[in-house]
Image (spheres, rainbow, N blue to C red):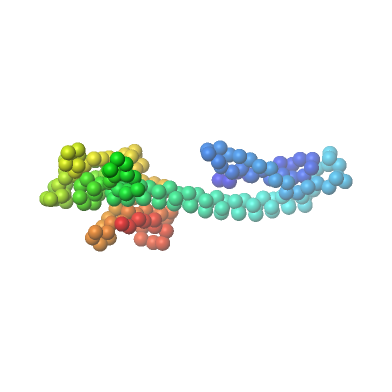
Amino acid sequence: MIPFKIKFGKHGIFLTYGFHIYNEFIFIDYLIMERSSSISRFSGFTLVEMLMTILIVSILATIGVTQFTNFSTDARSAVTMEKLLALKTAINGDPHFYSGGEYTKPGFIAHCHLPPETLTDLITLPTDGAYYVAPNQACLSAYDPFLKTGWRGPYVASDTNWNIDAWGMAIQYFVTGPPARTIRSCGPDKICGNDDDLSVTF
């Protein structure tokens, strides 16, 4: 909801508009109808002034709600895309992080020699021997610092929403044609397979 307030002062009618910044609402006053100096400061507002105020506020409210809705969708999309990219990095690693002759963000594949079967394998030690078959069984055991192979997770922060998008839906992970994989959010409408989906393929 967009917060609006109407204030009637001796100098005119003010619209107070609130906007949200860092969990707080900041209010700004706008003079939308100035009273004539010839009118006594003790007199009331005319019916025309009241009707004009209602009309202006209605127009501003419609515009404000639309802009707020678009801003909210854009913000959720940005947060979700950031999470999809973080999951991709957890799987593929990031070659830009390099120190002391080693990659500091090698990712799941570097340790296990193949992509995870599910996203859950990024936060818990895999157990599916049917997927992690020889010679790619390294991730069925914990990381060996001498061999430099084995599961070294969790590869993402394992909070309760680690695989949930900004609309509260589970993020999907699937094969889109070996070896390509896709990480996908169903987007604002929460229905996958249409134009508002957000996805990363690698």
- Compared to residue 69, the image places residue 160 above or below, namely above
Residue at position x 60%, y 54% in the image = 63
- In the rendered image, the quadrant that contains the N terminus is top right
Front residue of this view, candidates 123 and 33: 123
Front residue of this view, candidates 86 and 22: 86
Whether residue 142 is visible here, answered yes or no, is no
Q: Is residue 18 left or right of residue 174?
A: right
Residue at position x 63%, y 40% in the image = 27
Q: Residue furthest front?
A: 101
Whether residue 182 is visible here, answered yes or no, is yes
- In the rendered image, the quadrant that contains the C terminus is bottom left
Residue at position x 24%, y 59% in the image = 179
Residue at position x 61%, y 43% in the image = 18
Q: Residue furthest right?
A: 38
Q: Is residue 50 left or right of residue 62?
A: right
Image location of residue 196, percent across then percent down: 42, 58
Q: How many marks?
A: 0
Q: Is residue 183 left or right of residue 50?
A: left
Image location of residue 155, percent across then percent down: 29, 42
Image location of residue 128, percent across then percent down: 16, 47
Image location of residue 116, percent across then percent down: 23, 49
